[in-house]
Amino acid sequence: MTSSPAPTDVSTPPTRVRFAPSPTGYLHIGGARTALFNWLFARQQGGEFLLRIEDTDAERSRPELIDVIFRSLEWLGLDWDGTPVHQSQRADAYREAIDTLLGAGRAYWCDCTPDAVKARAEARGGTPGYDGHCRDRGLGPGEGRVVRFAVPTDGTVAFDDVIRGAVSFENAHLEDFVIVRSNGTPMFHLANAVDDAAQGITHVIRGEDLINVTPKVLLLRDALDTPGSLTFAHLPLIVNEKRQKLSKRRDDVSVGDYIDRGYLSEAMVNYLATLGWGAPDGIEIRPLAEIVALFRLADVNKAGAFFDVKKLQHFNGEYIRDLSLPQFVSRSTRWLYAEDVPWAPDAFDVATFEVLAPLVQERVKLLSEVPGYVDFVFLPEPVIDDASWQKVMVKGRDLAVAVLAHAERVFADCPWTREDLEVVLFAYAEDHEVAKGKVQAPVRVAVTGRSVGPPLFESLEVLGRDETLTRIRAAAARV
Ligand code: GLU
Ligand code: ZN
């Protein structure tokens, strides 16, 4: 390891970060990356990683998703410290902050309808946004009224972002933003600012899409006389292959989908760590403990990070190959006993699977592919893949007919071991000067239904002579 240890300073408060999802959707790739970078930073600094559920928006929050978010974090292995805070249970703290702001004249009631705000903006000549109309009207609470924060008319809000450097916003460009909705619930930035202070958060690590929230949070902290300071690190956007921001509608983003597709959590975590960060030595696939040791917030890039599913699959394949055989078998269980397996419930046999497992482990990129590699053994007859049949049995009909006839003859009485099966089948290749792969193909399609799968002769050995011959004859008849 070449990096120097992370600086520690006894006079600064212990590092405390938080992951603060809004339960308006499943945990998605971007959220998982944010959680991971917070967790990495906390673990490396010997600090704390807290969870906060930002569920003050009753209309958009879906409480049933909170548990899904917890489960997804657990699956990723991102253990959190303490008990998660739920903002929906902290109304009193927000009320107190709002009263403070109203009392100090830093916030005011407003009864403007969105249409009125818009009409005035148009009359002004198009500058959109709220014009401070109610600032000095002295309104009190009332049906349908919101509370707005009185943004200073001049000056700037500036901060040093660990990743983006100096960032500043002109106050003149910020409208008097709403901090309490007309239904009485606090807006996200208010609750966010209050809780970061209450929880003693030292670093806010979150997606760049939230950078516009930061000046509001800083203004609120200032108006509330919040002691201490926050360090911000805004992580680069995650983009798809068209360099578009990853979107829930367009792209596959939910962590749960990746779990169901047979990704290993360790592969996913390792891949997520590469989305915006890289170790100084350029090695990408490495144990999490090493990533914890090497990770530096300041080394995170500004440029958008490409979420490359092919690369994730490659990571996953590597991690699958790294499992011990018993681990591979046990982690495949979920897919082998799934409701949608192609074979009858009592047809599956673990001992048979274990014979094939080493061959499958070498080849799959996803655990969900495992049943497709072994189903031919557990099905009464193979499921014929049309494309494979067309290519091998229709386009290569003459060779297929000849090879199947040869196989039927030589397999009838040869010793049933993978070595002998190979010798007798490939005798055809030598006698007729045909490539071995071309000779294997019709037998493979006849027996397994597909032109790709585990090694042929091992598969035949497991399947047994009678079943192999039955399938070869059935295919020959069909050709
Ligand atoms: N609740 C916010 C979100 O899910 C995150 C807020 C933050 O990290 O400061 O977008
Ligand atoms: Zn108003």
Image: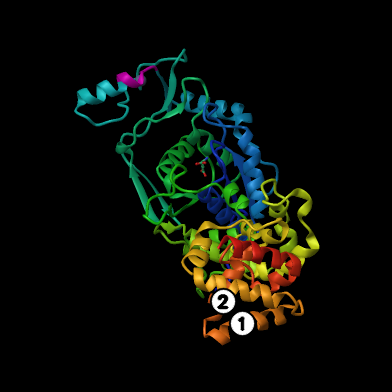
Region in magenta? 111-116
The extreme top residue here reads 143
The residue that label 2 is drawn on is 439
Q: Are marks 2 and 1 in contact (CB under 8 Å)?
A: yes
Between 300 and 425, which is closer to the camera in this rendering? 425
- Within 10 Å of disc 1 (Cα), the crowding (few <14, some 14-19, many 20+) is many
Residue nearest the observer in this picture, 135 or 296: 296
Find out if the beta carbon at label 2 lies less than 8 Å from the nearest ligand 1 atom. Answer: no
- Report x, y in % for residue 1: 58, 76
The amino acid sitting under disc 1 is Phe
- Position of 225 with respect to 80 (left or right) is left
Left or right: residue 240 versus residue 328 is left
Task: Name which residue type carries label 2.
Answer: Val
Q: Which residue is mark 1?
A: 426
Q: Which mark is residue 22?
A: none
Residue at 80%, 64% (x, y): give it.
351
Question: Residue 341, relative to residue 96: is it above or below?
Answer: below
Tell me which residue sits at (49%, 69%) in the image: 396
Figure quadrant of residue 417: bottom right
Residue 323's image quarter?
bottom right
User: x, y percentage for residue 221?
Assistant: 49, 39
Q: Nearer the viewer, residue 462 or 275?
A: 462
Q: Earlier in the sequence, mark 2 or mark 1?
A: 1
Residue 56: in magenta span = no
Q: Position of residue 194 (x, y in %)?
A: 55, 36
Residue 95, given in percent of the width and then of the height, sits at: 56, 25
Q: CA distance from mark 2 to mark 1?
A: 7 Å
Q: Quadrant of the C terminus?
A: bottom right
